[in-house]
Amino acid sequence: MITRQVLIRNLRAAYARAYVRVRSQFNEPEWVVAEAVIPLLIVLAAATLYRVSGSGQLAGFAVVGGAMMAFWDNVLWLMASQLYWEKESGNLDLFIIAPISRMSILLGMSLGSIINTSIRAAIILLTALTILKIQLNVADPFALFLVFALTLTALYGLGMLMSSLYMLYGRGAFNLNDVLSEPIYLLSGLYFPTVGRYSPFPTILQVLASLIPLTFGIDGLRRTIILGETLESLTLHIAVLSALSIVLIPLAWRTLNYMEKLGRREGRLSLRWM
Amino acid sequence: MDVKELLKAVRASAWVGWQVDSNWTEPFIFIGIQVVRPLASTMLFPLLYVVGMRLGEAPVDLEYLSYLIIGTVLFTPFIYAAETGGQIVSQDRERYGVMKSIYLSKASLTPYLFGRLLAELGLSVIATAASAAFAFTAFTYGLGLPIQIQLTDAAKLAVSITAVYTGSAALFYLLPSINLLTNKLHWSLTYYVLGFLYLAGDVLFPVSYLNQLLAPLEFLLPVNQALNAARSALGLRLSGDPLQALVVSAVWMAAGLFVFSRAVGYARHKGLLDKIGWW
């Protein structure tokens, strides 16, 4: 039974964790610049490639993908790896001792990350649209909002799940992030559609790609922002993203509890330099 | 330091580099990092081009597709050099504390970095060869888009590839030189450089397409001439002089070594070799 007091305590913990994350951004503005400029360079390269090959009208695809790339990088490096870093810096011990649910920490991390990364994504989007002179074609703002909200919910649900899994693993977590980054850029269709009739991938790869929230998220955003599609044509996207959200967040919760128990049993929760 | 000791230092550094960078004891991670990841980078832009043409219902220009594939495959050594070179200083100063040990030992940072370079070159050869084989097979047989590659001049190709690796080695020395003097760029510098080279390095399109004023970069950067010479040696209709490419890369390499030795001297003088934190 969750009492009002417990609920308020956990919400305050989530707010505190989100506050640290948002505040830290303003202490290190170099990171904001780097995380906006670097994807922007790749977006410009991809958009120019569309133009060189005579498909200039699709340059907006690369821009939407580049903006969403900021969220994926954030999930990998500032969600998935975060509890491992907290362990290295000694904060995880405090989180375990504190009378709060670890999920409130993950929730705060997610909310702070969403705020930070939204700023970066907006910088990337607006700068690229201005430089490349791309016209937006939003016919259904509600559909855009819904797809964006569902994408972030599912994506950060995946981040919470990965964070729980990475908590007990050391250097392997960094390596796994390295392994995952580029293949996910490719599979999730950051710069071109990877699901549907224009996908270059066989069906089995398209099914696997659909399990990554980014895949249907980016495709849905492209359709609403660039192609001007409305809610009626996005039912599959909304269904897939809703299903992923419903599965990933409870799974993250269960995994976190399991990994915490395992860590306590094996005495690995505060082991560093693994 | 005599030659025997120097070789011993280089060999030990290369072994350290292999162990740190390859993750060879964990086959899943090794294959993931050294094969799957570079492969994804190699395939990304050629596939973007193919999908773009399909969406526009236009035929794929096989010669341009070959241009893209050769470009992205042979850009792999530059990615490896920038990623490893960009991280060495922060890893060794901040995480493992190796810099101060090398400072105290008889060896210097120059043979250490050379050993690390040898390990990095070995790994990038594996990644480049795997990417080339997979990309050729996937496009030719998987997507039914036969890559138009024909070896017209083996010597020219050999010199071009030497220019690619020499140019990448120059990056490998230049990035740590900058990171020795500041800790704020230890992550971002690599990706600034790679992003710039994707745009201006003739990897995906001739730099002159962006703006005619940028056309001279084709003869100044260590990437453009080397890639174009390799494309020419592989039968594409491009003018690329491998000797010119090698000279440009050699000049960059000499500049890289000079800048690195100056940066090491400055870092020793200012006590930066064990200065950790955000500065």
Image: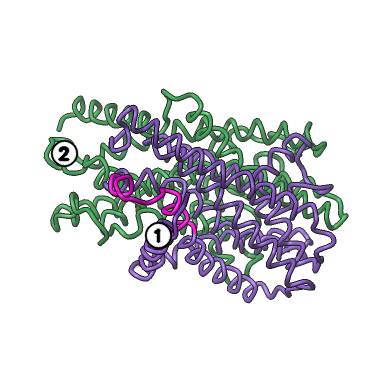
Residue type of the residue flagged with mark 1: Gln
Of the two numbered discs 1 and 2 in the rendering, the one whose residue sits closer to the viewer: 1
Question: The numbered mark 1 sits on a residue in which chain?
Answer: A
Query: Mark 1 and 2 residues: CB-CB less than 8 Å, in contact?
Result: no
Magenta segment, which residues? A93-110
Please identify which colour was used for chain A in the image. purple
The answer to whether residue B231 of the structure is visible from this angle is: no
**Label ID, residue B101:** 2
Q: Quadrant of residue A184?
A: top right
Residue B158 position within the rendered picture, expressed as x and y whole percent measured from the top left:
55, 35
In this picture, residue A39 sits left or right of residue B23? right
Most common SS among magenta residues: helix
Q: Does dot 1 land on a helix, a strand or a loop?
A: helix
Real-space Cα distance between discs 1 and 2? 53 Å
Residue A180 shows in this picture: yes
Q: Quadrant of residue A227?
A: bottom right
Mark 2 belongs to chain? B
Q: Is residue B64 left or right of residue B192?
A: right
Specify whether B218 is left or right of A82. Answer: right
Return the residue at label 1: A5
Q: Position of residue B49 (x, y in %)?
A: 74, 52
Amino acid at circle 2 = Ser
Depth check: give the residue in front, A197 or A138.
Answer: A138
- Quadrant in the picture for residue A209: top right
